[in-house]
Amino acid sequence: MRILQTSANTYTSMPIVHRALLVSLTIITVGLAFFDPNEKGRYDFMDGLEVFLSSSDNPSFVLSPDSEFYDVLPYPAESEGGSPPITDFGKYEHIIQSGDTLSSVLNQYGVDLSDISKLTKNNKILSNMGIGQTLSWELDDNGGLKLLKWSVSKRETRTYELVGNQFEEVKDIIQGEWVEKTLQGEIQGSLSEAAKSIGLTKKEIAQMNRALSWQFNLKSLKKGDKLVAVVSRELIDGDLEQSQLLGVRINTDGKDYYALQAENGNFYDIKGYAPSQGFLRTPMSKSFKVSSHFNPRRLNPVTKRIAPHNGVDYAMPIGTPILAVGDGVVTHAKREGAAGNYIAIKHNGQYTTRYMHLKSLHVKPGQKVKRGQKIGLSGNTGRSTGPHLHYEIWINGKAVNPLKANLPRTESMSSSDKKAFENYVAPVKDKLIF
Ligand SMILES: [Zn+2]
């Protein structure tokens, strides 16, 4: 009783990460791990231990050289700074290896098959055990299984306890310690390479690229351009468990571009616009050469007449996937004269986009589409001198240059939302300095 009290007192004064780790450990482990030589409780505990270990004539305490559990409890000195896999009499531990099944593991330590089937009956998930995970379990005085712990990961432990005649599952998710880091560097090759070299994870790089790509052409970055990012990482026992990009700033050509994560998890630029609501820069996922620019007074190469070229032409192989540049509703999807197979999408009232000379149409008039959705394949239909996509953006009934258009962002935030956003991102913004 006294030991538990001592442990509980120590527990509240431990750093978060330590405390978190201990949650899933057994009572015995807790007792040892919190061992403090200055605590009086130690002596009570040691006495109990000595008595326990000296009962070597206990017939059911079976050991084998290969067993995963310790034959004796380690002395407190050895347990300092770590939590060795301690097993007590009646407690067992096993690390899952290739070929192991729950019943083969338990059965080899003498657990009765009827207990195993009782356990698995309501807990089919146990068949998902993976190599390297740890199982520990306890037997009652009659050798019956009373409790099994499955350490799924450092983060997750599932405990199955015999209640009445069945095993009930309790899931424990451990919160690790979140650590904030500021990482910075210079562009040498691509932005992704620079991000990787300063230590951003794959996921963080993808978040960064998505959040910034609508603001400027990522490929236009030059050697020596600067990059700084703030990330938050969850560490459990010193290992990276998960990570999050909180903000990033790029400096190129004397300009700064930011992507800041707001409380809702979305990224916004410094003014609080949400890139995710904006348009894709091009209706393709790859970049292609512009074969003809937007030009209100162009000499048409086919008709030889001066006529406006209301869009931009991208040369591309027939069959290239064409994407809706923003959310909207399809107003046209049909074959029509010079346009060939074409699609028109109306976005949020002001904006319409049009896609011409397609090989095939994958949407129908009236259909709602999402930004980035494949709407068709490029082709060479209608009045066209070679495989290309003719792409138009219309704002309030007027064609604009798609390469220069002010692409739609999100609706402006209300002033109170903007204030909240600014307050939320301020601490991160303050760290994004070169
Ligand atoms: Zn064209």
Image: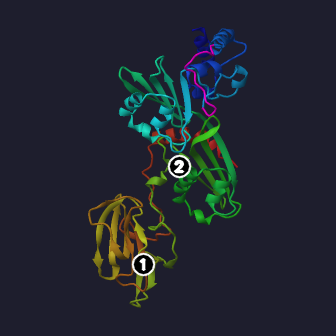
Count all numbered tags in the image, as a single digit: 2
Q: Earlier in the sequence, mark 2 or mark 1?
A: 2
Looking at the image, residue 418 sits to the left or right of residue 71; the answer is: left
Q: Is residue 414 above or below residue 94?
A: below
Q: Nearer the viewer, residue 227 or 316?
A: 316
Is residue 369 on the magenta stretch? no
Residue 360, image x and y in percent? 34, 74
- Look at the image and tell me in which quarter the N terminus lies: top right
Q: Is residue 128 above or below residue 210?
A: above
Query: Are there few (<14), some (14-19), or many (20+) residues within 10 Å of tag 2?
Result: some
Task: Write down the residue under mark 1.
Answer: 318
Ligand 1 in which quarter: bottom left
Residue 4, image x and y in percent? 58, 13
Query: Are there few (<14), some (14-19), or many (20+) residues within 10 Å of tag 1?
Result: some
**For the residue marked with disc 1, what is the amino acid?**
Ile
In terms of secondary structure, what is the magenta stretch mainly? loop
In terms of image quadrants, where is residue 35? top right
For the point 53% across and 54% down, which residue is it? Answer: 211
For the point 67% across and 9% down, which residue is it? Answer: 47
Can residue 228 be seen from the camera position used here? yes
**For the residue marked with disc 2, what is the amino acid?**
Lys
Is residue 65 on the magenta stretch? yes
Can residue 157 be seen from the camera position used here? no
Dot 2 lies on which element?
A: loop
Dot 1 lies on which element?
A: loop
The response on whether ligand 1 sits within 8 Å of label 1 is no
Tag shown at residue 418: none
* Extent of the magenta region: 55-67
- Give the Cα distance between marks 2 and 1: 40 Å
Task: Write down the residue under mark 2.
Answer: 271
Q: Nearer the viewer, residue 417 or 29?
A: 29
Residue 45, image x and y in percent? 65, 12
